[in-house]
Amino acid sequence: MHATSSSALPVGRGLLYVTFAATAWGTAGAAAALLYRGSGLGPLALTFWRTFGGLVLLLAVRALLRRRADTAAVPAPYEPLRRRMTRIVVTGVALAVFQAAYFAAVEATGLAVGTVVTMGAGPVLIAIGARVTMGERLGGGGVLAVAGALAGLAVLVLGGDGGADVRPAGLGFALLSAVGCAAMTLASRRLGKGGDSDPYASTISAFAVGALCLLPLAVAEGLWPQGHDLGRSLVLLGYIAAVPTALAYGLYFAGLAAVRAATASVISLIEPVSAAVIAVLFLGERLTMATVLGTGVLLSAVAALAVAEARGAVSAARSAASAAG
């Protein structure tokens, strides 16, 4: 496996960005599960507020960074208008589908099953899509890492104590969310090459398109939270917009400039582990031996793929240095 990114961002830092984003995403599902208990919001309204709130925060952060930055701005690489618009629209629509379908899965079949199925199907779809559209190859070690990650997820799903309420509608929403995640990742990776050098610009554009797509659907579903326990609902909405949305997606899209699409998808499997830890520590759910085993297999696979990615980057750098010398 070799590094293919032309980004100036070091691969190690890109891996760190994607890892943090995946960990933060695991908290979004837990916050959504709490919101469903008293806010009266449905998945479409919740996704709209997450997207719109994240957009506002990203605009504020970008303005602040520009104010503090040197006045001599670095010009962005040229990108044809049609290519730029295609990238923005595809990424934004895919982002809206990914988030809305995920929250619908959490509502329909629960946090654990919805998260595990979404993040388990995502790497398979992304690996296939990356192979077809970009010619990316994981190599033998990468294939084993993906298989190990999926095996860990299978243990998490099938090895429980039978208390999970697995519903077909929830599974369908989770698979739809995985499709949206795959489309978003591949579009950012393939269409983003040679485009915006500012990761905030790409993220803001995607969020703007997603919010516009979601607004009429959210209004039809019921846009405003109930007055009962409104303060709690606003705090949860603010957290979802700030940490697992504005911060996490900004880091994720920045990391995609240095990390291969399939690698990012497998690292994102940390999300269900993060959700499981939160469920045990804060929601009173019981940790079974199957959960411990599945988590261990999953983390081992993610670590193996991250090490393979780093080694590939070092090997590519050495080859380039040798050729230049």
Image (tube, rainbow, N blue to C red):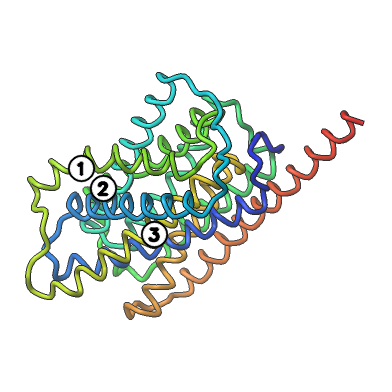
What's the residue at 33%, 37% (across, down)?
A: 92
Task: Name the spot of residue 54 as percent of width and height, x first.
Answer: 33, 53
Q: Which residue type carries mark 2?
A: Ala
Q: Quadrant of the C terminus?
A: top right
Q: From mark 2 to mark 3, how far is it between C-alphas?
A: 14 Å
- Labelled pair 2, 3 in contact (Cβ < 8 Å): no
Q: Is residue 94 left or right of residue 296?
A: left
- Closer mark to the observer between disc 2 and disc 1: 1
Question: Which residue is under mark 1?
Answer: 214
Q: Quadrant of the N terminus?
A: top right
Q: Which residue type carries mark 1?
A: Leu
Q: From mark 3 to mark 1, how far is it between C-alphas?
A: 18 Å
Task: Name the spot of residue 252 as percent of width and height, x first.
Answer: 49, 49
Q: From mark 2 to mark 1, how far is it between C-alphas?
A: 9 Å
Question: Which residue is under mark 3?
Answer: 244
Question: Which residue is under mark 2?
Answer: 100
What's the residue at 17%, 70% (across, down)?
A: 37
Report which quarter residue 29 is drawn in.
Answer: bottom left
What's the residue at 34%, 77% (across, down)?
A: 285
Q: Secondary structure at mark 2?
A: helix
Structural crowding at the residue carrying mark 2, measured as other residues with C-alpha within 10 Å and reported as few (<14), some (14–19) or many (≥20): many
| Label 2 or label 3, whichever comes before in sequence order | 2
- Labelled pair 2, 1 in contact (Cβ < 8 Å): yes
Report which quarter residue 262 is drawn in.
Answer: top right
| Label 2 or label 1, whichever comes before in sequence order | 2
Q: Secondary structure at mark 1?
A: helix
What's the residue at 14%, 70% (across, down)?
A: 38
Q: Which residue type carries mark 3?
A: Pro
Q: Is residue 227 left or right of residue 77?
A: left
Structural crowding at the residue carrying mark 1, measured as other residues with C-alpha within 10 Å and reported as few (<14), some (14–19) or many (≥20): many
Task: Name the spot of residue 58 as percent of width and height, x first.
Answer: 38, 52
